[in-house]
Structure formats: structure tokens, C-alpha cells
Amino acid sequence: MSVFEFAVKFFQDSGVAIYFSITIMAVGLAIAIERFVFLSRARAENRKLWAKVLPMLQSGKFKDVLNATSSSDAAIGKIVTNGLERMQSPARREDIDNAMEEGMMEIVPRLEKRTHYIATFANTITLVGLLGTIIGLISMFSHMDDPKK
């Protein structure tokens, strides 16, 4: 028996619950792949912007940094922009820290988008597998009681 034949027989013998499990797994996998690609791109954008901005920050060119970060869509650009905008007015260090934390609060939901579904699907697929096992056991025991089946 080949691997393909074994897989086909497995799906045929598994019952209805396997189709729900496969659907949930496919949706969860699609979300995980999409998030991986998005976060990889975001990380690359952040690194590129930080490599560009860090020398300007170290040399004290805050206006140039503000121009570079305000036009960027990178997450770190939003945080630095919030901090630099607060620096332009006389403010305490805590005010600048708070402004940067507000920038983080805007960015984090965008980065964590749809990730909670993965945990939900993991819990659900476990319960669907258990349901399939119970249905299989019921079917097996009903066939044992009736010798005609």
C-alpha cells in the first residue's frame, strides 16, 4: 500500500470530523503564514529605518530624524516620531516616555492582528478531534452489539 493510498483510506475511515479539522487547520495555517510574512516585512522595515536614523540621532540632528520617521510607515518610525514631536515643546522626560508609549499602543494592535484566532483554533481543533473519537467509539460499539452490521 502506497503512502497516497494509505492517506486516502485514512480520510475515508475517519468520518465527518476530519473535514472540520482540516478546515480549521487550513484557516489557522493561513493566518499564521500571513502573520509571519507581515511581521517579517515589518521587522525588515524597522531595521532599515533604524539603521538610517541611528546615526542622525547620535549626531543630534533631530529635525532630520523627524522628517525621516514621519514619512515612514515603519513601527519604530511612529514611536520615534511621537517622542520627537513631544520633545519640540518643553516637556519632562516622563512626557516623552508617555508619548512614545502611546505610539506603541497604536502599533501593537496592528502587529498582533488576528493572532488570537490561532489559539482559538488550536483549542477548537482539539475538541473536534475528541468529538471524532467519541463518534468513532459510538459507531464501533454499535456495530459490536448488532452482528448483522
Image (tube, helix red, strand yellow):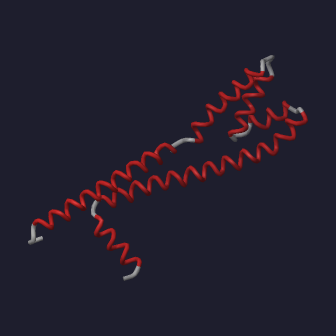
| Residue farthest along the bottom direction in this orientation | 1
So how many labels did they put on this image? Answer: 0
- Give the answer, above or below, for where 149 lies relative to 124: below
Is 73 or 119 nearer to us in this picture? 119
Q: Where is residue 119 in the image (x, y as percent from the top left)?
A: 46, 46
Quadrant containing the N terminus in the rendered view: bottom left
Quadrant containing the C terminus in the rendered view: bottom left
- Give the answer, above or below, for where 53 lies relative to 103: below
- Give the answer, above or below, for where 79 lies relative to 121: above
Q: In which quarter of the image is residue 63?
A: top right
| Residue farthest along the top direction in this orientation | 90
Question: Residue at coordinates 83% horizontally, 40% vertically from top-left?
Answer: 54
| Residue farthest along the right direction in this orientation | 59
- Give the answer, above or below, for where 114 lies relative to 61: below
Q: Would residue 22 be found to the left or right of residue 36 on screen?
A: left
Q: Would residue 124 be found to the left or right of residue 44 on screen?
A: left
Q: Position of residue 3 (x, y in %)?
A: 41, 78
Question: Residue at coordinates 87% horizontally, 41% vertically from top-left?
Answer: 55
Q: Where is residue 86 in the image (x, y as percent from the top left)?
A: 75, 23
Question: Residue at coordinates 85% horizontally, 31% vertically from top-left?
Answer: 62
Question: Residue at coordinates 55% horizontally, 52% vertically from top-left?
Answer: 34
Q: In which quarter of the image is residue 75?
A: top right
